[in-house]
Every structure is written in C-alpha cells, then in structure tokens.
Amino acid sequence: MGKLLCGVDIGGTKLSTALITETGEVVDKCIECDHVDKPECLMVDQITYTIKRLIRHNELQESDLLGIGIGCAGHIRFRDGVIITTSNLKGYKNYALRDAVQSSFHIPVILDNDANAQAFGEFKFGAGRGYDSMVFLTISTGIGAGIILNSKLYRGMTGTAGEFGHTIVEPESTLVCTCGNRGCLMACACGMALPHLFKQKTESGMKTFLNLPRDFNYASVDGKLLKQGLDLDDPLSMEIILDSAKYVGIGIYNIFQALNPPLIVLGGGLMSWGDFYLNQIKRTFYKYAGNMIFDPFEIVVSKIGPDVGVIGAASLVLEK
Ligand SMILES: [Zn+2]
C-alpha cells in the first residue's frame, strides 16, 4: 500500500478529519461538531488528537502518512500558514494555525482556503482529472472558488486569489454582501441571497405554491425549500433559481474572459437544483460568450460528492 494522506476540513458546523488514499478513497473518517466555540489552542489540540487517534485506530504510524492538509474557510495567507480572518469561527485573527498543528507532527502540514482545497480535490480525483487547468466554484451559503493553472493552485499575492464571490455583477443592487459592497456575485446568487429574494418577490405580489407555515420566517428560506418549490413548478421558487443562475452565468463569463480555462467545475449545496439550474447557467454563459469560444470548453458539476471538503484538504499534500 502506498502512503496515505490526512485531510482536515474546518467548517462552520463540522470539523471533519479523514485518512485518504493517494487515489482519493476515504479509508477512515471522523466528524465532530463541538469545535466552533473553542478558543484557538483547544481546537488545535482537538485536531491533533483526532489525527493521532485515526492513525492509531488504523494501526498506522505517522510515517505511513505523506502529510496533513487543512482546509479552512476565510482569508488564508498561504505562505505563512496563517488564518487572516474567518467568519466560521470566533477569534482566529492572524492565527498561525499551520505551525500550531505542525508542532505535534514530523510530516508536512499545509493550510489553505477550503475552496482552494476542494478545487484541488476535484482536479486530482474528480471532474478535473485529465485537465491541466480549471476553475472550481462552490455555490452554497456563500460562493468560493479555486483556480488551477498548469496543475498548480493559483493563489495570488496574499493567497486570496479566486474570490469571485466578491466580484460585482449588479452595482445598483439592493442586495448587500458580507463585505459591505452592493451586488457582489454572492450577495445576488447564493444561499445568503435567498431570504431577501423570496421576501422581495412575495411583497411585489408574486404567489407561491409552497405550503408555508403560519409563522413563516423569511430567514428560513434556503436551497432545500426552493428545491421543494422547483419540484412543484412553483413560479416564485423558479424565478429565484433563474435569477441565481443568471448571475452565476455572468460570473462564469467573467472568469472565462479573465482566465480562459478549458473547464469550470460547479459544486456546493445549490447544485442540488439540478439540470434546471445548470442549463440556465449555461444558457446565460453562452449568450454572453457568443462567438468568443475558440476551443473546447466545459461547465460541469463536481464529482466527489459530500466528502469533497476533507478529500480536497488531503489532496493539498499532493500539490508539487
Ligand atoms: Zn462582497
């Protein structure tokens, strides 16, 4: 057996740790949900303890692992292994997480943004196999992305390249992003926009077939509710999904013009809206791209599935 990879995915609700083969199969996995309110040093202890426990449970030694990759949402200064800011956890301002974990291990520890990690996972083991460049977009509560150029993640000066969620697609929009700007792609198109869009359209008189409770709270509108609406041919749900697709299509068009990649891979919870959503994204993209596509270009859905976070984190170890 070849060496294994260890992946750690620090999410806003789950801390996932897994051992992965060099071909991307999960050997063993542990999911914990009690990390969010912990101060930095206690979460480092938790990560370290969980990795050592997984190694022990599988009758392995640390030297059986090639390295440990950690994915974390937020702005990461990659070369220093530092979390600059993250909205998922309390604290962690300019926190040197990589070195804190590294101090308990002799194998390399790598820290990167979670979307970069997922992008590299899709590149190594998923929809990006066989390509040398691609852009990955994850569309869920927010929008994250990772850029792979010539088999390497492109991270930019700080490590924050690919924040396409903050590119502005509608400067006059009433939707305000977490960054404070109006009309960012993620303010208009993803999970965080859904309650506002649902409220706006309801207040403008649109009817919904959804059977909403008497004490319905707009804040509860999410991708799952709109998927129910889509399955009922609910006009209000369909219109919101079409709006989202339009902005994602514009976002992909802008990415295409900036980087000219051969492949865009789409992941994240809102892709459960299925072909209705994907086809409209493509329709918008191709409308704008017109006759400016000169070589084969694909927009596809991610292949790895729900373990993409932790598999992606582990895959960072394989980046040369
Ligand atoms: Zn923004």
Image: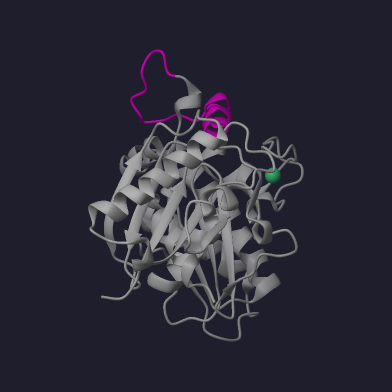
Residue 119 locus on image (x, y percent): 50, 64
Q: Is residue 213 above or below residue 293?
A: above
Q: Which residues are magenta?
A: 194-216
The structure residue drawn at horizontal position 37% and vertical position 55%, both measured from the top left corner, is 274
In the foreground, 240 or 145: 145
**Residue 108 in sight here:** yes
Q: Quadrant of ligand 1?
A: top right
Residue 124 locus on image (x, y percent): 43, 73
Residue 53 locus on image (x, y percent): 31, 48
In the foreground, 135 or 227: 135
> Is the N terminus in the top left, top right, bottom left or bottom right quadrant?
bottom left
> Is the C terminus in the top left, top right, bottom left or bottom right quadrant?
bottom right
**Residue 160 in sight here:** no
Residue 196 sits inside the magenta stretch: yes
Residue 104 locus on image (x, y percent): 48, 51
Q: Residue furthest top?
A: 215
